[in-house]
Image: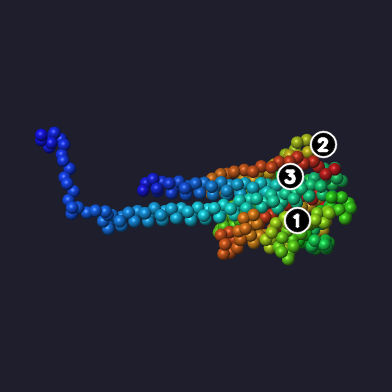
Amino acid sequence: MNTASSGWRRRAPRSSRAPKGYTLTNLMVSMAILLIALSALITTHLFGLRMFEINKMKLGASQEIPHVFNPIFADMKSVRMVRVGQGTQTSFSEAALNSPQQGNALQIYASTDTNDFVRYYLDAADTKLKRRAADGAVTVITKSATNATVFTVEDMAGQVLTNRAVRSIIGVNLQFSAVENSGDKVGATRYAQGFRLQTKIAAPGSN
Amino acid sequence: MGIALGSVLAVMSGYKVSMYRTEWSLNATAAQSLAVQRLEQTRAARWEPNAATPVDELTAVSFPTVMRTLDVPVVGTNTPQARLVTTISTVSTDPPMRWVQVDCIWSIGPRGPFTNTVTTLRGADL
C-alpha cells in the first residue's frame, strides 16, 4: 500500500539531534512579554493607590462640611441672642464694642437666661473646635483648625461689624492643616495646598 | 497582549470614573453650602415696610450675581468657582411675603453646568 498516494504520510522519526526545550531567544522574548505585562500591572496598581488616596481625601472633605456646620446651624435655630469674642471651656469675654466683632468663640443663648448657653470655641492648645453644651459637657467638632479668628459678626454684605446690630450674620471661617475624616495633611508640600470651610448664619436676635 | 492591555485600560478607566464621581459629590456638597450662605445673607437683610422710614434691603440689587470659590481642598492652581444667582420675587403684599431662590451654578472642567438650588419664604420685619 502506498501511503503517500492516499494522503497519509508517516511522521518522520525525531532526530536525536533535534533541539529539546527552549532556546535563549525564546526565553528572552517570553521574559520581555512578562516584564511588560508586570510593568503594566504595577503601574495600574500604583495609579489605583494614588486615586484611592485622592478619593479618600475628597470624600473626607465632603463629609467635613455637614459634620462641622450642622451642629452650629441646629443651635442657631433656637437662638435668642449671640455673642462673639474670646473664649475657652471655662471663660468667655465678648468682643468690645466699637471694635471688630470677631474672635475664636461664639456663645449662643437660647433664652434671656445668660446662664443657659452653648459655646463654640477654638482651643488653641490642641487646634480643635469644641462645643460646650449648656450642661458643661464638651464635645470636639473638628480638629486641625489653624486660624485664630473663627467667628465674626457681619452685616448683610459681609463686612465685619464693630457693634451689635438688629440683624446680622455670624460668619464661620475655618482653615485646616489636615482633612480630619481622612487624616490627610494639607500644605505647600502636600497633594492639596489648602483646605478651608466657611459659612454664614443669620442671627436675627443678636442685638 | 491585546486582552491584557484592554484589561489594564478598563481598570484605569474605572478609577477615573470613581475619581470623577467623588469630585462631583464634593463639589455638590460645597455648592450646597455656598447656596445656603447666600440664603442666610438674604435672611439677614432688613425689610421694614411699616417703619417710619421704610427700609428694604431684600432686593435683587442687594444680591447681585457673584462668583465664589468652592470650599474644597485646593490642588495646585485648581480652585473651582461657582456662580451664585439670587432671585427675589414678591409672593404677597398683605401680609408682606417674598420668595427667595439661590442658584449655585458650577462645573467640573468641561462637564456641567450643574446647579444647586435652595429657596425660602421670607416675611417682613414688622
Is residue B60 toward the left or the right of residue A78 in the image? Answer: left
Residue B25 is left or right of residue A170, and the answer is left
Q: Is residue B66 visible?
A: no
Q: The numbered mark 3 sits on a residue in which chain?
A: B
Q: Residue A6, image x and y in percent?
A: 13, 33
Can the viewer see residue A137? Answer: yes
Q: Secondary structure at mark 2?
A: loop
- Where, by quadrant of the figure, is residue B79 drawn? bottom right
Q: Give me the disc on residue B95.
A: 2
Q: Which mark is residue A95?
A: none
Mark 1 Cα-neighbour bin, 10 Å: few <14, some 14–19, many ≥20 = few
Residue shown at the point (78%, 35%) measured from the top left: B92
| Disc 2 to disc 3: CB gap under 8 Å | no
Residue marked by disc 3: B59
How packed mark 3 is, by other alpha carbons closer than 10 Å (few <14, some 14-19, many 20 or more), is some
Amino acid type at image mark 2: Pro
Q: Which badge, 2 or 3, is on the more N-terminal residue?
A: 3
- Mark 2 and mark 3 on one chain: yes
What secondary structure is found at the residue carrying circle 1? strand
Q: Quadrant of residue B72?
A: bottom right
Residue A69's x, y, as percent?
Answer: 71, 51
Nearest-to-viewer mark from 2 and 3: 2
Q: What is the distance, in whole Å, between disc 1 and disc 2 at their CAs? A: 43 Å
Q: Are marks 1 and 2 on the same chain?
A: no
User: Amino acid under label 1?
Assistant: Thr
The subunit carrying tag 1 is: A
Q: Which residue is mark 1?
A: A139
Q: Residue B84: x and y, percent?
A: 65, 47
* Nearest to the observer: residue B35 or residue A167: B35
Residue A207: horizontal and vertical position, in percent? 84, 53
